[in-house]
Every structure is written in C-alpha cells, then in structure tokens.
Amino acid sequence: MVHSRACVYAPFENWRRIDIADNHAAEQWAQGVQQLVQEDYPQATRITLVMDNLNTHGGASLYKAFPPHVARSLLDKLACVYTPKHGGWLNLAECEFSVLGWQCLDRRLPDLATVVSEVQAWTKTRNQSNQPVDWRFTVEVARIKLKRLYPILSG
C-alpha cells in the first residue's frame, strides 16, 4: 500500500515531479525540497513553494533531516506560501494528483515498485506533452468562496 506521494509542479513551465514513498515523514519532505533546490532548480535564487499546512512542511523538517548549514542554505532559497487551512485543494499540485488518479492510478497495482514505475512513465509523458493544469478557480470565485480571506477593494 502506498502511503504517501509528493508533487512538485512548476505552472509556468508545465513541469512536474511526483515522488512516491511508503511514509510521509518529515525527512521525506525535506529530501524532496533538497532535490527541488539543488537538482531541479540549482540556478534559482528564490523558489516560491506553495504547500498545504501539513506539520512536516516547514523549516524544522529540514533541520531534522540535514546538518544546520544545509538546512539553512535550503531555506534561504525558499519563499514558503501556505494554502489556507482546509484549502489544500487550492494548491495546483492537488489538481495534478487528481489527474494522476484518473489517468494512471485508477486500477489496482501489485506493489510499490509498479506504482513508482507507472507514475514515472505518466509524469514523463505529461511533461513531454507540456500539458498545463486546467485551473478553473478564478479570483471572482475565490472572493465568494473565501470571502473572509479577501479584503474588499474599493476603487
């Protein structure tokens, strides 16, 4: 049984990376962030990382997984943005998980190795097709659904 998945999605590039693991520990998240910073975008001076409010999604997890100088160097490149509580569905990565579910994981797979292989193949195909997330949540809808979070602008 697969217990965890993590998705990195770069919307302006229509590029994604999905990691599959049998846990959702802080160290797993930290390793994904390290890969994002050091391998996926090593030349970036700043990476905006939009995430849900899971307790493992934060600087403490980096310090738990790496020596302090490594954790600090990773944090220095990140601008962390958290979706509102109970608003993880606002995260574009969640849209990717939905598509992954109905295009790739809509059947029984025998083991973790098969899941990883299938997800990697799906990710490669999706990245090559340059297929964007079909984001339908407009600012106007957000102002209605999340009115307590949006200020009223006069103009």
Image (cartoon, helix red, strand yellow):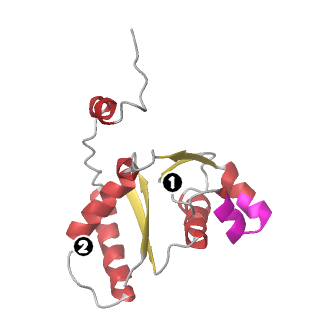
Above or below 134: residue 101: below
Q: Are marks 1 and 2 in contact (CB under 8 Å)?
A: no
Q: Which mark is residue 88?
A: none
Looking at this view, name the residue that lies furthest to the top.
155
Callout 2 amino acid: Cys
Determine which of the numbered discs, if any, sits on residue 53 in the image.
1
Mark 1: few, some, or many residues within 10 Å (few <14, many ≥20)? some
Residue wearing tag 2: 104
- Lower position in the chain sequence, tag 1 or tag 2: 1
Magenta region, main secondary structure: helix
Report x, y in % for residue 123.
34, 68
Nearer to me, 87 or 90:
87
Secondary structure of the residue carrying numbered label 1: loop
The answer to if 68 sits in the magenta stretch is yes
Determine the image quadrant of residue 15: bottom left
Residue occupying the point 51% across, 47% down: 82
* Looking at the image, residue 31 lies above or below residue 80: below
Q: Residue at x 67, y 53 (%)?
A: 75
Residue 48, magenta (yes or no): no
In the image, the segment drawn in magenta is 60-71
Percent across and percent down for residue 111 are 34, 90
Tell me where residue 146 appears, x and y as whole percent: 35, 35
